[in-house]
Image (spheres, grey):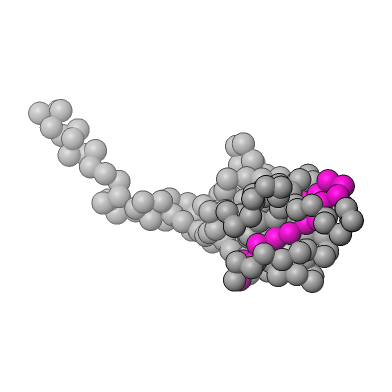
Amino acid sequence: MKFILLIVVSLPLASATLSKCEKDLLKRCRKCDLPLLAADKSCPLVGYDCSASNEELKDFNVTRGSYERDCDLLRCQDPLATLFVEGVPYQNLGCSENLWRFGKHYTLNTTTAACIRRCDNCKVYVPSSEGFPATPAQIVAPVIGRPCASVECKPGFELYGKSVEDGEIMLVTEDLQCTGDRLWVNDVDAAMVTVFCKPNVEGDN
């Protein structure tokens, strides 16, 4: 009889009525304002594209668990973006006492954050329409002052790219940078799906 009573009492909490105390606690962990966007403050020094639009950088998603009974958790809506607070990546922020908290035991709190994509993972390959002696471009790793990856060709070769718009192969005349969209771009040429190197024929003559 005691065992049967225990089963009845142990029905899932999701179907139970919240007590006043529980409601008060949930109020304080469901009333956090969305973090302010502070791209400069949140952005890591290298490897991430902080030049994205404000809409992308503040694309936050707040959830309350399967039964809508949990405290608010904030993550990035975009699966390709990483949540950053003061240049450090975190999986999520947790709402507690009307503050967004983070860290190993959620002991720190913040009013700013940003969702940022990597910009060191763009592709370099030779399109099937090209062949020898074309070679993949060489990726130049990001450094402080140039946070996104760039590309170059060895001496005697010129840089070409495959346009994302129409697939056209074109000579690239300016330096390219990788973006959070995994495209190679600059201010002159179209965005490129991939970049590669071909011998500079004129230079050999």
Percent x, y of residue 21? 42, 51
- Secondary structure mostly taken by the magenta-highlighted segment of the chain: strand
Residue 73: in sight, yes or no? yes
Seen as rendered, the residue at the extreme left is: 1
Percent x, y of residue 190? 70, 70
The answer to which image quadrant residue 179 occupies is bottom right
152 within the magenta span: yes
Residue 87 vertical position relative to residue 170 in the rendered view, above or below: above
Residue 170 vertical position relative to residue 69 in the rendered view, above or below: below
Q: What residue appears at the point 65 percent right and 62 percent down from the top-left corner?
A: 162
Percent x, y of residue 33? 60, 64
Seen as rendered, the residue at the extreme front is: 205
Q: Quadrant of the C terminus?
A: bottom right
Q: What residue appears at the point 79 percent right and 52 percent down from the top-left corner?
A: 199
Q: What residue appears at the point 79 percent right and 70 percent down from the top-left corner?
A: 187
**In the image shown, does 70 or 198 lie closer to the viewer?**
198
53 vs 153, left or right, is: left
167 within the magenta span: no
14 vs 154, left or right, is: left
Q: Quadrant of the N terminus?
A: top left
19 vs 30, left or right, is: left
Percent x, y of residue 14? 30, 50
- The stretch in magenta equals 150-165
The answer to which image quadrant residue 107 occupies is top right
Residue 36 vertical position relative to residue 95 in the rendered view, above or below: below
**In the image shown, does 163 or 114 lie closer to the viewer?**
163
